[in-house]
Amino acid sequence: MRFPITLFFILFMSLQGFSNDGYKLWLQYFPIQEPEAWQISALSNYEVIGSSATISILKKELETASIGMIQSLNPKKSTDHSLLISKIEDLGIPNLPNEKIDQLTADGFGIFIYSSNQLIVTSKTDIGLLYGTFRLLQYIQTGTSIPAMGIFESPKVQYRVLNHWDNLDRTVERGYAGFSIWNWHRLPRHIDQQYHDYARANASIGINGTVLTNVNANALILTPEYLEKVQALADVFRPYGIKVYVTARFSAPMEIGNLSTADPLDPDVRQWWKSKADEIYKYIPDFGGFVVKADSEGQPGPHNYQRTQADGANMLAEALQEHHGIVMWRAFVYNEHTPDDRHKQAYNEFKPLDGKFLDNVIVQVKNGAIDFQPREPFHPLFGAMPNTPLMMEFQITQEYLGHDTHLAFLAPLFEEVLNEDTYAKGKGSPVAKVIDGSLHGYQLTGMAGVANIGTDRNWTGHHFHQANWFAFGRLAWNPYENAQTIAADWLRLTFTTNPTFVTTMQEIMLNSREMVVNYMTPLGLHHIMAASHHYGPGPWVSGGRRADWTATYYHQANEKSIGFDRTTKGSDALSQYASEIQQQWGNLETVPEKYLLWFHQVDWNQSLSDGDNLWNNLARQYQKGVEEARRNRDTWEQMAPYIDSERFQHIHSFLKIQAEEAQWWKDACLLYFGQFSKMPLPSGVEPPAHDLAYYMNYKPQHVPGI
């Protein structure tokens, strides 16, 4: 059957106007409104000096940006200005700002105006040029002018790594955006375009490492069958400046090496790992190294052989040393058989080992001592290991913050932790200075983020969760970046530069994480989510084989009080922090109320800073979170004129879910805790929609990411 020409034209035009599905992330390159002369020149009159796979990618990026941002507008080209992109050694131009250029590291870049009519992007390396080009394009897209003094940036953190908790069967632990993007079955024979797009997105925000496999490791990744698949991905990522890492299962010598032990001090085991490392580097000459989860949640480790974490890490570090690989050894070590507060166990395990790790080991520490809660005090190890490089581990995927449907911009969480003062060298010793190495002179520095990426067309499930990937990259590059700037930049790059939209949604983003804390875990409550999948409220969860996997272990609610006493009268976890922090957080009068129930067991009648009692404050915080979620849903409805319909409707649907589930959280938690406080709900707090039995018996089905 033939279509009439008019019908074909209508169909074609409708496809041309198809809505935005979010696949382009923050690399939209939509037309600039009223472009300035320098922007037109940069995108139409440029020269790139050099030849390499990375330079080819850079040129393609400029072409793509030019087509999207200005060519569709058919602007009048300016010949008075030009853009030159070149490594420093090839510039061949006198009177450069050499002092600033000399201070750039290999990944650093300079963007500056030369002789009033030439814009220059330069670096010591091709990868630095790629980073600088992406930054320039972001300035152009957001309508930001190049400062008169130029932009000279080097990353403050060396290893800026995404940790994929992806399994070889393509399931993703704590993944809420579909399956793993790594199609192991098709590799290495088929290279999906998405691998290039993934690398491109990471390079655009300065991420330079990818851990391909879950920390709950599978030894098969170390076999030749899989190493050739890893090699194929490494070949894709290399021109984008990204190294690959894999997780090393501690028992691999037994599982795939036919040894009878995995004892890290056994000579045969050490030789096995040395040979395995040599084999890996034959496939991947620039292989980054190993990430290891050991002695935690069922994973094997050096404890199986009465060895220390340093014994285990150093064995692997020796195997990688001659290849310049590193070991990222996770400090997430706790044991249900240890009769102590879980908050204390990692510190107790690692503090005595300070200075006993080899130079190519970096200890990877979660931002808090429990497990990526909506809010946690910073991990005490960050103030306790001056002789051992520590890297930050943030969770980008929202295991405890509503999975894929709850808007929670995590930059304020990351920023809050990085700004906390450890007092490791007195006042003015923030976590950020530990992470960038400046406080203790670490030779290795790093930041890891547990990825939220999957096969969903928009990569992250919720469109706004792309912002958390973006924010992680920006803060890994510079831990002193602020959440406000990151939010505004992401909005302008991803949706529109319309000031009404940007200002409105920036405020929602910046307040969204606090909103989630309000309707989930206010005033320092923690780990009261449902068991296993952690989706929805479960303050009643108790029993099972592990007390530290239950909610009642953490909130300890009774008819008199609620909260976990971590002062000297309780578990004494506070003693792991500096004396200045102990003094402030250990006192009911001075502890920040956001940490109140984290460190104190507090009477229901205890008066808080507003003069009202704990129960009323708790109830009002829950209600506040619900009202904020509803307000966000309503505000979003006013944003329809500013963006495409597909993303608008998708986000609107999720915001409605969030508002409904915020009420679910409030009702369930207040009913449960109310049976202990025996107090009525204060004025302004809505009565629950159902009784407690309803919420306790509600079982969500098919929750992903377990």
Image (cartoon, rainbow, N blue to C red):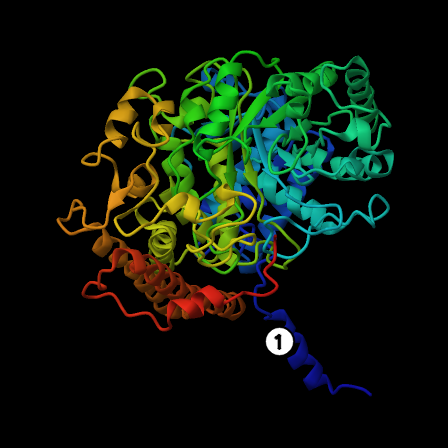
667 vs 550, left or right, is left
Q: Is residue 85 visible?
A: no
318 vs 572, left or right, is right
Which residue was labeled with disc 1? 14
Front-most of residues 456 and 664: 664
User: Which residue lies at the image location 64% right of the left edge and 39% below the top edge?
Assistant: 58
Q: Is residue 316 visible?
A: yes
Q: Is residue 323 above or below residue 294?
A: above
The type of residue carrying mark 1 is Ser
Q: Is residue 164 above or below residue 386?
A: below
User: Which residue lies at the image location 18% right of the left edge and 36% below the top edge?
Assistant: 589
Question: Residue 199: percent from the left, percent from the top?
Answer: 66, 42
Question: Residue 488: percent from the left, percent from the top?
Answer: 40, 48
User: Which residue lies at the image location 50% right of the left edge and 15% below the top edge?
Assistant: 352
Which quadrant, please, contains the N terminus?
A: bottom right
Q: Is residue 80 above or below residue 445?
A: below
